[in-house]
C-alpha cells in the first residue's frame, strides 16, 4: 500500500509596482490631512473627540452670545471687544494646546511608527512641518474663526453692513495678524514639548507649565523686583506677550492695573518676539525630528 500526496508551490515573491507613484508632496499632504483629523479626534472614539471639540464649543460661546445680543438689539453692539477676546478664552486655548499636541506627535512615538513614516518618500523635516501646520490650522479654527464670526455678525445686525465695514475694516488685518502669531506660537510650544516624550501625561503637564507657571513667575518677579528690570521678565511669559501683541494689533491700551500698563513696554516688541519665538520653535521642532531615533 502506498500513500500519494499532492502539493502546490506558490510564488510569494515581491512583484514590481508599475502604478502611479504620487511622491513626496502627496505624502506630506496626506500626513497633514490625517493629522488635522486627529486634532479634533475625527475617525476615533467619542472620548478622543470630547476634549478638543468640547473646548472648541466653549471658545465659540462668547462669539455666539455676542451675535445673539446684537441680533436682538438690532444694532452695532460689541459685548466683547476684539482686543479682549483672547483674554477671555486664554485658558481654553492653553487647554486645547495641552490636549491636542500630545495626541499629534506622542502616539507615533508610543506606537513606534516613526520608522514607517521615514522609510518612505516622507523626510523627517516633512513630518515635523506637516504636524506643525495641522496644529496651526486647528488653533486658527478656534482663534480666527470666532473673531471673524463676531465681526460679520455685528455688521449684519446693524442697519447697514457697508457702513459698518467702512468704519471697522481695520479690525480685519488685526484679527488675522494676531490670530496667526498666537496660533503659530501655541502650536510651536505644544508640539516641541510633546515631541520630547511619548508619555501623554508628562507632555500635558509640561505644556500647562510652559503657559501657566511662567505667567505666575513673571507676575511674582515683576511685583517684587525693580520695575525697570522686572518688566523684561514679561517677555518670558507667553500669556503676557500674547496679550501685549493683541493690544498692539488693535491699537488698544491695557487696564491701568494690568502689569503691561505698569511695564509700559512697546507693543511692537511683543510682535517681534512672537515672530522670533515662532520661527525658533519651528526650527527646534524640525531639528528634534532630524535627530530622533526611529
Image: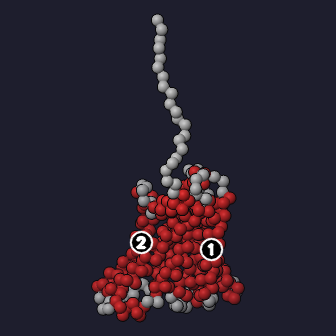
Label ID, residue 279? 1
Quarter of the image where one finds residue 228? bottom right
Label ID, residue 58? 2
What residue is rendered at 58% in x and 56% in y? 121
Would residue 276 be seen by someone viewing this image from the given angle?
yes
Residue 282 in the image, given as x and y percentages of width and height:
62, 69
What residue is rendered at 60% in x and 87% in y? 268
Residue 15 in the image, given as x and y percentages of width and height:
53, 41
Direction from residue 104 to residue 281 in the image, left or right = right
What residue is rendered at 59% in x and 81% in y? 241
Figure coloring: secondary structure
Dot 1, crowdedness within 10 Å: few (<14), some or many (≥20)? some
Query: Mark 2: which secondary structure?
Result: helix
Residue 90 in the image, given as x and y percentages of width and height:
50, 76
- Residue farthest front in this picture: 18
What residue is rendered at 43% in x and 73% in y? 59
Nearest to the observer: residue 284 or residue 60: 284
Would residue 196 be seen by someone viewing this image from the given angle?
no
Quarter of the image where one finds residue 280? bottom right
Label ID, residue 185? none
Query: Mark 1: which secondary structure?
Result: helix
Tell me: residue 89, above or below residue 135.
below
Nearest to the observer: residue 210 or residue 272: 272
Give the CA distance from mark 2 to mark 1: 29 Å
Residue 254 in the image, given as x and y percentages of width and height:
54, 89
Nearest to the observer: residue 182 or residue 2: 2
Dot 2, crowdedness within 10 Å: few (<14), some or many (≥20)? some
Tell me: residue 55, above or below residue 66.
above
Q: Going from the N terminus, do you reach mark 2 or mark 1 first?
A: 2
Q: Nearer the viewer, mark 2 or mark 1?
A: 1
Tell me: residue 62, above or below residue 287.
below
Amino acid at each position: 500500500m502506498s500513500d500519494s500526496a499532492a502539493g502546490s508551490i506558490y510564488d510569494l515573491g515581491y512583484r514590481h509596482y508599475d502604478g502611479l507613484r504620487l511622491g513626496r508632496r502627496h505624502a506630506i499632504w496626506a500626513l497633514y490631512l490625517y493629522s488635522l483629523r486627529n486634532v479634533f479626534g475625527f475617525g476615533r472614539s467619542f472620548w478622543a473627540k470630547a476634549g478638543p471639540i468640547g473646548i472648541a464649543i466653549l471658545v465659540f460661546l462668547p462669539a455666539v452670545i455676542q451675535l445673539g445680543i446684537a441680533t436682538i438689539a438690532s444694532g452695532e453692539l460689541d459685548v466683547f471687544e476684539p482686543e479682549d477676546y483672547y483674554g477671555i478664552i486664554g485658558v481654553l486655548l492653553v487647554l486645547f494646546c495641552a490636549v491636542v499636541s500630545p495626541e499629534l506627535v506622542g502616539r507615533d512615538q508610543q506606537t513606534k511608527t516613526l520608522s514607517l513614516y521615514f522609510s518612505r518618500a516622507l523626510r523627517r523635516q516633512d513630518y515635523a512641518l506637516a504636524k506643525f501646520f495641522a496644529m496651526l490650522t486647528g488653533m486658527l479654527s478656534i482663534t480666527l474663526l470666532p473673531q471673524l464670526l463676531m465681526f460679520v455678525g455685528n455688521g449684519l445686525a446693524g442697519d447697514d453692513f457697508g457702513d459698518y465695514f467702512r468704519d471697522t475694516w481695520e479690525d480685519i488685518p488685526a484679527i488675522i495678524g494676531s490670530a496667526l502669531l498666537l496660533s503659530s506660537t501655541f502650536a510651536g510650544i505644544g508640539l516641541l514639548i510633546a515631541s520630547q516624550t511619548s508619555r501623554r501625561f508628562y507632555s500635558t503637564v509640561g505644556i500647562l507649565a510652559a503657559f501657566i507657571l511662567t505667567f505666575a513667575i513673571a507676575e511674582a518677579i515683576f511685583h517684587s523686583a525693580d520695575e525697570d528690570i522686572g518688566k523684561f521678565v514679561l517677555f518670558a511669559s507667553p500669556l503676557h506677550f500674547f496679550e501685549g501683541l493683541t493690544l498692539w494689533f488693535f491699537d488698544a491700551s491695557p487696564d491701568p492695573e494690568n502689569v503691561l500698563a505698569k511695564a509700559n513696554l512697546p507693543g511692537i516688541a511683543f510682535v517681534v518676539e512672537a515672530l522670533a519665538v515662532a520661527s525658533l520653535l519651528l526650527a527646534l521642532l524640525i531639528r528634534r525630528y532630524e535627530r530622533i531615533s526611529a
